[in-house]
Image: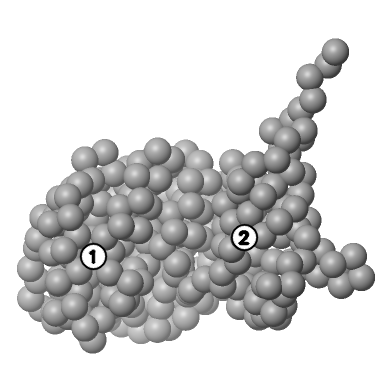
Amino acid sequence: MEESTEYEDEVELYGRVRALDKSNKTFRFHYIEGGKEKRVYANLDNMYESLIFNALEEEDDQKVFIRGTGNFENRQLQRIEMIDDFRLLDSRDIQFRLSDLKNLEDGWFENQGIAPSTEKLTKLSELFDLYYTEDEPLPYIYPTLDGNLELEWTINNVELILEIDLSSLIGNLLIIKGDKDSEYSLDLNFPSGWNELNDILKGVC
Amino acid sequence: MKGCTILLRQVVSDWIIDGRLSSQSFRPFKEDTLSTYDGDMISSEEAYLHYTNVLKNKSAGVYGVTCDEVVEQKLQIIEDREPYEEHISINFHDVSKNGRKSKSRKLASYAFERGSLYAP
């Protein structure tokens, strides 16, 4: 007997709501996987209906997070059957951005530019989730050509550039105030490094 | 070139978030020089088409800084005109790693304030 390849599993997806079918009580959700845009239909959940409407109406490309149960066939997500969590995200949401960067491919800049390691991005996502203080301003997160990241903040005319080596999770923070700058080394493997980062950002705000 | 001449720089989408440019957009990577187009000789759109169609690179848009803004950062402008006639280099030679970050951040901010000069 042939083994069934259909199954249900939990899904956590970052993407955008693109269309709504009120008569069928479904919406179309777009997300990026392996550098390609994927489309999947999801059942419209009464609890999150107004948020889903808002996500669609936003003009500036509203980013959203969905956690729920997906229906898979041959390992491909076919449909989101049930939604357990639906969130509208800030345009600079850290988890969305780090998830998005997993889709970067080698050669992204002038045929050079190494893609950051997916595994290391996942590790960094977990650390941000655990230790980055929510009331601090969200960084702009950019990939670097050597496969690492640079995070930037502009706060009260102060520029901060945090270069993170994804292999070692050591951060080099440069603070630029007018013509003067100062530099800090932060070990982001440990809470102490994150506390220092949070304290520095709090001091600048 | 004049002080108000705009030096055009191509920026990839990965370095633009909410319209804000990464400082890396205006910082050389391993080299000492940053490639730009002479805005007096080529339009933003033509520069974009040259960069994407002829050089086969990706660009999300064209941004620019004036020669005055580059000189203000104590960076030298080299009219090398190679490998193509409109090519101008901004020289970061002898600038420290932190200095490069600081100066490129300033240039990226000037370019951001000026806005996208051409987007496909």
Mark 1 and mark 2 lie on one chain; the one further toward the N terminus is 2
Same chain for the residues at labels 1 and 2, yes or no?
Answer: yes
Q: Is residue A149 visible?
A: yes
Q: Could you tell me residue A164's position as x and y percent?
A: 25, 51
Q: A152 or A126: which is nearer to us?
A: A126
Q: Could you tell me residue A70's position as x and y percent?
A: 69, 47
Quadrant location, the N terminus of chain A: top right
Q: Chain of mark 1?
A: A
Circle 1 is placed at which residue position? A161
Please identify the residue farthest to the top as the structure is shown: A1
Does A125 appear above or below A133? above
At x 35%, y 84%, the residue is B4
Mark 1 vs mark 2: give the one in front: 2
Q: Is residue B119 visible?
A: no
Circle 2 is placed at which residue position? A84
Name the side, left or right, on which B41 lies relative to B77.
Answer: right
Name the side, left or right, on which B84 lies relative to B22.
Answer: right
At x 9%, y 63%, the residue is A183
User: Based on the displayed image, in which of its 4 quarters is residue A46 positioned?
Assistant: bottom right
User: Based on the displayed image, in which of its 4 quarters is residue A64 positioned?
Assistant: bottom right
Q: Which amino acid type is shown beneath numbered disc 2?
A: Asp
Q: B15 or A112: which is nearer to us?
A: B15
How many numbered discs sit on the rendered protein? 2
Q: Residues within 10 Å of mark 1 (few under 14, many from 20)?
A: many
Please, what secondary structure does the residue beneath circle 2 have? strand
Q: Could you tell me residue A175's position as x and y percent?
A: 15, 70
At x 28%, y 69%, the residue is A133
Quadrant location, the C terminus of chain A: bottom left
Cα separation between marks 1 and 2: 36 Å
Please identify the residue farthest to the bottom as the structure is shown: A156
Name the side, left or right, on which B45 lies relative to A38.
Answer: left
